Every structure is written in C-alpha cells, then in structure tokens.
Amino acid sequence: MNASVIIMLPFLSTHDAMSQDVLEQQKTFIENGIRCSLYAQFSDASCKDLILNYSDLKNRLEREDSVTIIYHHGVFWQQGEEILKKFPKPTILRYHSITPENFYKPYDHASYVACAEGRKQTLRLLRLPHIY
C-alpha cells in the first residue's frame, strides 16, 4: 500500500488559524499525489464532512503500515495523546505556540487549565519514541 498521511488536531474550524494551517497542508499533500486525511475530535458544522470519524481513524492506524501522523499541538488534548500512545506510528509534532496560561488566569479558568495542561502535555509527547 502507498504511504499516506493523517493530520490530527483537537478541533477543526473554518475560523481558526491552526485549522487553516491544517487545511492548507492537506491541500498541498493531495496536490502532490499523497493520500491525506484529517482527524479532529471536534469540528464546526462546516467541517464535519472533511474529517475521519474515530472508527475510521482507528481502522486506518491498525491496518496501514506506511501511515505517518502529523499532530498539530496547540492546547491540551487528552484523546490525541491517547491515540499517539496506542498507535505508535511515525509522528511529526507540529507545535503551535501554546499561550502562557497566566495570560488567562484573571478571566478564563477553562483556557488557563487547557494551556497549563497543554504545556505539560508537550513534554510528555516529546518523550514518546515515535515523535519527531
């Protein structure tokens, strides 16, 4: 089977910078003849048809030997970390600068926690032997 790429991120939206990066990246792969799929746990309604469902993602990762993951990391994402641990495929970590959590501390507790946990998660992800 030919090599393929799966790009993963927590949320795909038409109004988000990380999502736009992912969509352009996918477009470039496809234009160059490389099979490329997207997986996001969450998406806005306009992007639902662009992503694999979890079952399809799992099947691809279990059955395809020559798949590479590009993991876009910009905030804490528990499911993403679990997938990377369960399916140790070659993975390129695309780091999107995580906002220092103290920026959010005075007014947005959920974002404060997501950024604080995301920074800790970065270190855990980098310790996985299949992350590049």
Image (cartoon, rainbow, N blue to C red):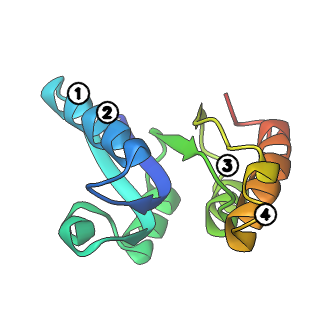
Q: Along the polypeptide, which appears first: circle 3 or circle 1?
A: 1
Q: Position of residue 78 (x, y in %)?
A: 69, 67
- Say whether residue 1 is left or right of residue 122: left
**Crowd band around label 4 with a 10 angstrom C-alpha radius: few (<14), some (14–19), many (20+):** few
Q: Along the polypeptide, which appears first: circle 2 or circle 4?
A: 2
Q: Are marks 1 and 4 in contact (CB under 8 Å)?
A: no
Numbered disc 3: secondary structure: loop
| 3D distance between C-alphas at marks 1 and 4 | 40 Å
**Badge nearest the viewer, 3 or 4:** 4
**Crowd band around label 2 with a 10 angstrom C-alpha radius: few (<14), some (14–19), many (20+):** some
Residue placed under numbered mark 3 in the picture: 88
Q: Three-letter amino acid code at disc 2?
A: Gln
State the image quarter where residue 89 is shown.
Answer: top right
**Crowd band around label 3 with a 10 angstrom C-alpha radius: few (<14), some (14–19), many (20+):** some
- Check the image and report above or below for 79 versus 27: below
Q: Is residue 34 visible?
A: no
Q: Are marks 3 and 2 in contact (CB under 8 Å)?
A: no
Picture residue at 71% right of the left edge, 67% below the top: 107
Residue placed under numbered mark 4 in the picture: 106
Q: Three-letter amino acid code at disc 3?
A: Pro
Residue placed under numbered mark 2 in the picture: 25
State the image quarter where residue 32 is shown.
Answer: top left
**Crowd band around label 1 with a 10 angstrom C-alpha radius: few (<14), some (14–19), many (20+):** few
Q: Three-letter amino acid code at disc 1?
A: Thr
As drawn, the residue found furthest toward the left would be 31
User: Foreground: 92 or 43?
Assistant: 43
